[in-house]
Each structure stands twice: as C-alpha cells, then as structure tokens.
Image (cartoon, rainbow, N blue to C red):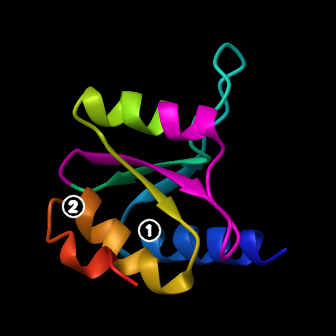
Amino acid sequence: MLEKRIEAALVKATHQRGGLCLKFVSPSMAGVPDRIVLLPHGRMGFVEMKAPGKHPRLLQVNRIQQLQDLGFTALVCNNFNQIGGILNAIQGLSLSSLRD
C-alpha cells in the first residue's frame, strides 16, 4: 500500500506546482507509466510508480525507454524523496536531485 501513498504525494505535489497528475491507462498498449504529469508552460512527463525497493518489469522499462527515445521525460518513482526531483526534471530543472 505504500505505493499508493507515494502516488498520492506525487499528485499533491504536482497540484501544488499548478499542474495535473493524471492516471494513465492505455487499453491498446501494456506497460505504460502510471501517471502523466502536466505542469505549467507546457511541461509534460510520465511517471511509473513503484513501492520502495521495487523496480519496473522489463516491459515497463522498455516503455519508459521508448518514451525517452521520443524526447519525453519518463521516470520511475519509488520513494517520497524523489518527488521533488522528478517534478523538477519534468519542469526542465536539474536532474541531480533525483539521486537517493
């Protein structure tokens, strides 16, 4: 259940920055990230949510890579402490705050 708490914190933090954090479901494509994050000034990114210590399945890793290859920010969040850095990355700020 901790994944849901981390996900709720991401939604709240996104809203605090004036954005939307939409649940992403694609019936025609498996393995897509859980959330689309939309931030002011046209910034958009994808976030795969995981419980602490958990990692994306191979299909999810491949989908994240596919999105990154298209030029999108696509990241994995499995820790409350990553949320600020992930939102910064989507906003085009430093990636250094993504490190645990």
The residue beneath circle 1 is 14
Residue type (three-letter) at the residue carrying disc 2: Gln
The structure residue drawn at horizontal position 26% and vertical position 81%, both measured from the top left corner, is 97
Mark 1 falls on what kind of element? Answer: helix
Q: Which part of the image, by quadrant, shows the C terminus?
A: bottom left
In the rendered structure, which segment of residues is drawn in magenta?
A: 41-62
Q: Establish if 40 lies above or below 31.
A: below
Residue type (three-letter) at the residue carrying disc 1: Thr
The structure residue drawn at horizontal position 20% and vertical position 77%, both measured from the top left corner, is 96
Badges 2 and 1: C-beta atoms under 8 Å apart?
no
Q: Is residue 92 left or right of residue 69?
A: left
Quadrant of the image occupied by residue 90: bottom left
Task: Name the one closer to the observer, 92 or 41.
Answer: 92
The residue beneath circle 2 is 91
The structure residue drawn at horizontal position 67% and vertical position 13%, both measured from the top left corner, is 28
Q: Is residue 16 left or right of residue 69?
A: right
Residue 47 lies in the magenta stretch = yes
Task: Name the one closer to the observer, 30 or 59.
Answer: 59
Distance from label 2 to label 1 (Cα)? 11 Å
